[in-house]
Amino acid sequence: MQRVHHLHHGLIINGFIRTEEDGGVFLAAGKPILMDFETKYNPVEQYQAGIILNSLSGEAAAQTLQRMAKWPEEEYARNCQNARRAAGDFDFKKLTDKLLNIIESLPERKS
C-alpha cells in the first residue's frame, strides 16, 4: 500500500495532509491537516481538523507529522470527522444558498 500520496499542492503521509496552501481545499479528503502557515480565517483551526505550525521549518513539520502519526485512534478519528464537517459547511452549494438568502432578505432599494 502506498503510504505517501501527492494531492494537488498537498501531500498525504500516512493518512495526514501537509499543505502549503489553504487547508480548506483539502478538508473534503476527511484527513487531519498539517498547515505550516497562519491565515486570518482558518477552518482547520476553527474546526480542530489538524495542526497549524508557527514555523516554516521542514524539521518542525517532520516532528509534528511524527507526533500526529502517534495520535490515538480516537483523536485521529475526531480530527477526520471535524475535517469532513468543515468541508460540508464550506460546500459551494451551501455557501451559495446562504449568500442568496442574505441577498433576498435585504430591503429593496428605492430609486
Image (tube, rainbow, N blue to C red):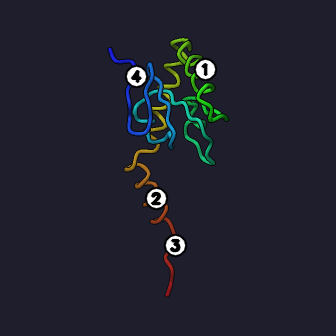
Residue depth check, mark 2 versus mark 1: number of the one nearer the observer: 1
Q: Is residue 35 above or below residue 14?
A: below
User: In the image, what residue occupies the spot 51% across and 39% down?
Assistant: 20
Q: Which mark is residue 63?
A: 1
72 or 15, which is in the foreground? 15
Amino acid type at image mark 2: Leu
Q: Are marks 1 and 4 in contact (CB under 8 Å)?
A: no
Q: Badge 4: few (under 14), some or many (20 or more) residues near its Cα, within 10 Å?
A: few
The secondary structure type at the circle numbered 2 is: helix
Amino acid type at image mark 3: Pro
Q: Is residue 90 left or right of residue 64?
A: left
Q: Residue extending furthest left?
A: 1
Rounded to the nearest angstrom, the CA distance separating label 3 from label 4 is: 52 Å
The secondary structure type at the circle numbered 1 is: helix
User: In the image, what residue occupies the spot 49% across and 88% down?
Assistant: 111
Marked residue nearer the N-terminal end (1 or 3): 1
Q: Label 3, on which residue? A: 107
Marked residue nearer the N-terminal end (2 or 3): 2
| Residue 109 placement (x, y as % from top left) | 51, 80
8 or 78, which is in the foreground? 8
Q: Is residue 40 left or right of residue 94?
A: right
Q: Which mark is residue 99?
A: 2
Q: Which mark is residue 106?
A: none
The part of the image, by quadrant, that contains residue 57 is top right
Marked residue nearer the N-terminal end (4 or 2): 4
Q: Are marks 1 and 3 in contact (CB under 8 Å)?
A: no
Residue depth check, mark 3 versus mark 4: number of the one nearer the observer: 4
| Residue 73 placement (x, y as % from top left) | 51, 12
Marked residue nearer the N-terminal end (3 or 4): 4
